[in-house]
Each structure stands twice: as C-alpha cells, then as structure tokens.
Amino acid sequence: MADQGNIRLAVLTSGGDSAGMNGVVRAVVKAGILKGCETYIVREGYEGLVRGNGEGHHSKPGSPILASGHIIKDTDPTLVHNLRFGDGDLLKDGTGDYQSARSLKGRYIVRVGWDDVRGWLAEGGTLIGTARSAAFRTPEGRLAAANNLIKEGIDCLAVCGGDGSLTGADVFRSEWPKLVDDLLNAGKITKDQATKHGHLKIVGLVGSIDNDMSMTDLTIGAPTALHRICEAIDNINSTAASHSRAFVLEVMGRYCGWLALLAGVAQVFGGADFIFIPERPPVGDPWEDEMCQAIQRHREVGKRKTIVIVSEGAHDSKLNPIRAEHVKDILTERLGLDTRVTTLGHTQRGGRPCAFDRILPTLQGVEAVNALLEATPDTPSYMIGISENKITRVPLMEAVAMTKAVAEAISAKDFAKAMELRDPEFAESLEGFISTSTLSQDKRLPKNQRIRVAIMHTGAPAGGMNAATRAAVRYCIRQGHHPLAVHNGFRGLLDDSIHELSWLGVDNWMARGGSELGTNRTLPDIDLGAVAAKFQQHNVQALLMIGGFEAFTSLSIMEQGRKHYPAFHIPMVHLPATISNNVPMTEFSLGSDTSLNALVDACDAIKQSASASRNRVFVVETQGGKCGYVATMGALATGASLVYTPEVGMNLDMLRSDVKFLKNRYGVDVKGKSEGRLVIRNEQASSVYTTEFITKMLKEEGGELFDARSASLGHTLQGGVPSPMDRARAVRLSLKCMSFIEKEYDIIHKQKSKTKIASPHSAAIITIQGSSIKWVPVKEMLEHADLKNRRGKTQWWTEYKGLAEALAGLPQLTDL
Ligand code: ATP
C-alpha cells in the first residue's frame, strides 16, 4: 500500500447513534493507519468540529509513543505504515478506559492510534460521542469548523450519520473554498495552509437505525435494531399465546417503515397480522374496517395471538397519524380482544451490534478510506452504500436528495412514488408480507393452473429453512396450489412420508431453528427410479428443495435423470440453506447469518473470559466442512487475530510466522493492558495441525507473554432462533422460488404434445450474486463446483481473510 505521507484523516459520528458506529470508527482508523495516514477522531459530531481544540491542546503528530517500554516513533522505518501501538492520545489523556474520550476537556479533535480502537467492534452506540449541532448549521459555525480542521492539518473527513449529517457534510464541502478564502483574508491561516488544504475530501457512511437512506440496501445499525425488536417480541410471545391476547407494537421509523415491515416479515410470532408503515398507508377507508376484517379472518382459522406493528410515523391515506393507542382501542372495542400496547422506544438503539453490524461497518469503513484517498477536486463526495452484497460508492447528494424525495412524496400523498423511491427489496418485502400474512381466497388461480408443489429439506439443518417453507406454503395456499411436505428428505419420500400442509399448521415456524420437515444427507441416487415413481404416485408437479450442497447435488442427479424418467420433467428449484455457505455461485445461503451471530455471541463471551486473564489466546474451532466462510467472516466480525481455513490450509512456515506475530503483538501491548485474543480455525483447515495442536504450541511458545486455551463451537453454530435477516431473506427468496415455479410450470404445460419436456433452465438454483438475484441452471452450476471439496471453485469472501488479519496487525507486526 502506498505511504500517504502526512495525510491526516478524521472520522466523526453525528445525529442519532446506532449500533455499528464504533465499528466504522475502528475501521476508518485502522485502514487509515494501514494506508500510512495520521488518524483523528472528532468527538461529539459536528459540535466537536466547531469547538475544536483549545489553545495549546493540539495533538502532536509524529511524537513518540510509549508502548510497553519501547519508544516507537512514527518515523521508525520498521513501522512501514506509521502504525501506532499502545496508548494513543485518546487513552493517554483519560482514565485509561475508552469512555475517557468524553473526559478530554476542551479537546474535540484528537489523534488516535491503533490500539485506541481495540475492542470497539462489540460496543453499541458511539464511543466518540454524537450531538445535534445548531452551530454547524450556521456559516459562522462552519467557518470555525474549517479553521479547527486546518489548524490540525486535516482535510479528509469521514462522517457517519443520517441524511441530516450527510447533508451537513455536503454543505461543508461545497463551501470549503470560500471558507478557506475567508480564513486567509482574516489572517487566521497562512497562505501555505490555504494552498495545502484548498480542497476538502469528504465521505459519508450511513449510520441510522431506520434504514431510511436511499441508494443503499442497508444502513449501519438497522440490522441490530431489527434484532432488538425481534428479541423484545420473543419475550412477550408466551404471554400473548397464553392469554390469547393482541399486542400492538410501536417501533421506530419516522419516514421509513423498514423496521416495522421487516419485523412484520421476520418477527417471532410467525408473522404479524397487520402493519402500518408511512410509505403505504392502509387502503381501506376507513382503515379500521380493513384491519378488523383481516384479524377476524385469522382468529376464525384458530389463531390465538394477534400482532399489529405500527411505525412511529404511520398515518392513513389523508396523513392523519395512526397511533398504537388508537389501534388498541379499536381491537378492544370492535373485536373484544384483550389488547396491550408495547412501545419499544430506545431499546431498539442499544446493545451489542449483531454480526452484520460489525462486518458492514468494517467493509464500509475500509472503502471510505479508499474513497477519501482517491478523491480529487473533480470527484463528487461519495456515500458508501451496499447493494445486496456489494459495497458501493454513490454520489452523496443524489442519495440525500432521493431520501428527501421519499418524505416529500409522502407529504404530497403520492404513496406510489414513495414506494418506487425505496429500493426494490422494500417492495418485495411488502409483497412478501402481504402474501404470507393475508389469508384470502380472492387470489386463487383457475383450477388448471394450480400446482402440487413438493417441499423438501436436504442436508444439515440451517436457520431459515422453516421460515422459507412457511412462506412457500402460505403463498401456495393463497394461489390455490397444494403444498406437499416431504418429511425426512428422499428417505421420507420413499416411505410415503408426505402430506399437505395448512395455513395454520406452519404459523409458528418462522422463529423455529432446525428443520420442521426433518432433513438428512441422503441423495436421490439411493434409488432414482423409485424416487421418480413416488413423484408420479403423489402427482408431484414441482419441487422446492431447501438445503445445502446435498440439495444442489440432488438437483443435478434428478436433472440428469430426466433422460430416463418423465416424472422429473417438472420445475425443480433449490433454495440454498446451509451454515457453511458452501453452495457454489451464491454469496449467501439461509442460515449463514444465524450461524455468524451464534459465533459472534460465543466469541464475545470467550473474549471476555480471555481478557479477564489479560493475556490469553483462545483458539476457537468452527464448523464449515471444507469451506472457510464462517471462520473468515467470523474473524472479521469478532476482530480475531488469525484465521485458518481449508482453502488456504496450514503449514509450518505459516505457524512459525504466526507465533512471531503473536509474540510481537503481546510484546507491544502496554503492560497490564493486554487483551484476550482470538484465533479462529475451521475444523478442516488441516488434518495435522489440529486445534489441540495449535493450542499446545501457542501455550508452549507464548511463555511469559501469553497463555492459550481452546473452545469448539460445534453444533451451537446452527443457532437456536434464526436471525431476523435469515428469516426475512428466507421469505423473499422462497417467494421468488414460487414465482419461478409458476412461470416454468406454465412454459412446460403450454406444450401441445402429450409428453412434456422440461428445459434445463427449469432445474435451477436461486443465487445472490453481487447486487442481484440470479437463477442458475444446475448444469451451469456444476461447472463452478469443486465437488471433491464440496464448495465453489471461486468464493467471493476469500480476500477477507487477509483483511481481517491486516486489521489485527498481522502483516506489519510479523516483520517487526
Ligand atoms: P438521524 O437519522 O438520527 O436523525 P441525522 O444525521 O439525520 O440523523 P440530524 O439531526 O438531521 O440527524 O443532523 C445531524 C447534524 O447534522 C445536525 O445537528 C447539524 O449539525 C448537521 N446538519 C444537518 N443538516 C444540515 C445542513 N443543512 N447544513 C449544515 N449542517 C447540517
């Protein structure tokens, strides 16, 4: 990486706090240092910029830093990338814990070092403080802010906040040349300073629990807020069922109904009964009738619980607010339901970030530094976004303008436009909610278009399998199709363990881990002829297989079997679900988010224990077969120091250099402030260098510096309750599978001949690739599969092993 000389880069958090903001600060600081920049944090958002540092309080760039008895100078040639260990300014001035940032009296722009942001991935809120700054909204305030930045020699700024904060950032950037001129004319800065800092580089990262920013699929903190909502509902679930109660839940979201919508889709009750979001007010007039009819229908089929979710910004089509209390009164008076209101309020903001709110800020923080360092006076300011699984750069002001346009469309009662301006996933989720929560006879297709769809789980259980099944079943019933559950995979099929599922029969499946249908690894080639005969016997007209590598292999076997068995000339789809995430070509499988969250929870607890004994290394073993996805992404999400994967393997040279790294790492720790560290090892990274071997080796080599222990996460990684992301993804992908089946069924049955021929395209896998969802025929996927190692030939995440280790200091410290 190029050394950026004395580029000084600052990061601030602004507006409402959200989980993951600390991850942004950590990533920007570490990536900045890795690129050779000097890194600063600005405390208390824009207010800190306006206040700056009092006279005589400037950080001293380039000053020696004391670390564990060594004087490490920034100019030390061994520290190629200006890496600073030990106490940076942030800790030196305070009491020694991270909260000390707030006790840095009179200093708001503070230089920070590598270890100042240690452990921040797991912390909720923002440790550098945030504020709403009235002063920054004024030209005088922004002039003071520019002066303070130039005095510190900073002209690169990463801002993490909502649309207000990003608007402020853009205003600041566009005004910058004028502010510099004014400061020069007022004699506050020198000509040299004016020339050197004539251009402000700015980048925005979206920290907002509402997921209310356009041009990005997710904002930092929204996934954690969704976790909190689902956990809260989980906690009142039993009482609702016991007393046959109704609950009205108010969730955050002034202009954006994402939290309410996703909670409605993913929440643990097995789907809410009704939701109110700002973008799509209820169509019924009066809406009270529409709501009561929907809930009445659900009660009539035997539902014991009623859940209504209300966004804080919900309103009717005339923009009259819809309040939780009013909804409660209606349910009590009209339907006689014992109804309670729960307002989740600030519990939605707090708490430890979920796995995604650690990975996303890390990847976006690194991208933000790249964008800053590549910025020229001619490039626009960027906002870092995400589209499906791709980190993107989008013009900041375009994103802000589009976000504002949603609020304007809502104010103008143009709800169709508001929906249009949200990303496609939002509309799909709403469609998903409607088709899985609304029991309606009106949508049923004519009899000749109704399909008998067999649904089967194959391979090991994974979070989200049941949610996907539930969505498919409900969609089928709504359309008039027949959802046939095949129990225990192909073995169950051969035993005729197959029966039609009902609407209510799957009601509670959303939150259930494991596989309600039962699953195993048996492939159809156990007796392909018999499998085809069972398809014929039960008149199976389409197949949805939910599972891992086995499901893909099974699909391939049956597709090839079409040569001999007409029963396989039907649409057959595979929805990937496996914690190993080893299905080729798709970037995510159902269950992989749940298992990452299980890993993060376990590692947080392990790290705490390792830190309590100050200098312990924990070697954590993960599942994953021959695929290192969980280990690698787990390392990125937990800030592990080293990760071992089957793809890269292990050898003696590597171990020798890793031991050296850990020794150097503990060697530069400030005495008494060592931390527990994690090494994550996939179970099949090596058959020789086992977890036990590595642990013993580290124990032996660590000597006085560190001790080592091991922990095996085993089947805990399958997770108990599926994560909200897995549930929401399950619904979305499952519904796409169903429309694929309908389309392909139609194509096959339009054929005039008596013998129907299914094209190779009709046996396909639904995949997430970059920023889109793509169908891949199984024939094509075979070319991309490494059948021996049961994974894809190429995998999108492999480069993150290097990133996780770089953020732990591996490349720099090994050569120290
Ligand atoms: P949230 O989504 O949590 O509300 P936000 O970033 O939208 O976060 P705001 O209060 O709107 O929160 O903005 C945060 C800060 O950004 C403001 O206090 C102000 O200092 C600055 N800011 C917002 N809009 C502007 C603007 N037009 N010009 C200058 N500064 C602004």
Image (cartoon, grey):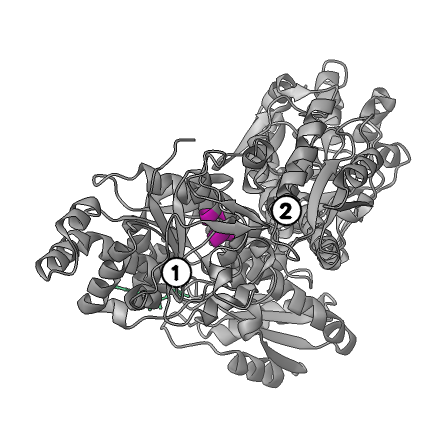
Q: Residue at x 57, y 59 (%)?
A: 224
Please, which residue is most extreme toward the top here? 563
Return the residue nearer the eye: 582 or 329.
Answer: 582
Q: Residues under labels 1 and 2: Cα distance? A: 28 Å
Determine the quadrant in which ligand 1 lies.
Answer: bottom left
Location of residue 642 (image quadrant): top right
**At numbered mark 2, what does the secondary structure look like: helix, strand or loop?**
helix
Q: Report the number of numbered marks.
A: 2
In the shown orientation, is residue 553 left or right of residue 750? Answer: right
Location of residue 295 (image quadrant): bottom right
Identity, as a three-letter code, of the amino acid under mark 2: Ala
| Residue 743 sits above or below residue 715 on the image | above
Identity, as a three-letter code, of the amino acid under mark 1: Gly
**At numbered mark 1, what does the secondary structure look like: helix, strand or loop?**
loop
Disc with the residue nearer the chain's start (1 vs 2): 1
- Foreground label between 1 and 2: 1
The spot of residue 578 in percent (x, y) is: 71, 38
The spot of residue 422 in percent (x, y) is: 40, 52
- Badge 2: how crowded within 10 Å, few (<14), some, or many (20+)? many
Q: Quadrant of the N terminus?
A: top left
In the shown orientation, is residue 388 left or right of residue 508? Answer: left
Instruction: Say if mark 1 contacts mark 2, CB within 8 Å.
Output: no
In the shown orientation, is residue 545 left or right of residue 744? Answer: right
The answer to whether residue 284 of the structure is visible from this angle is no
Q: Is residue 745 magenta?
A: no
User: Which residue in the protein does label 2 denote?
Assistant: 730
Q: Is mark 1 within 8 Å of ligand 1?
A: yes
Span highlighted in magenta in the image = 23-29
Q: Quadrant of the C terminus?
A: top right
- Badge 1: how crowded within 10 Å, few (<14), some, or many (20+)? many
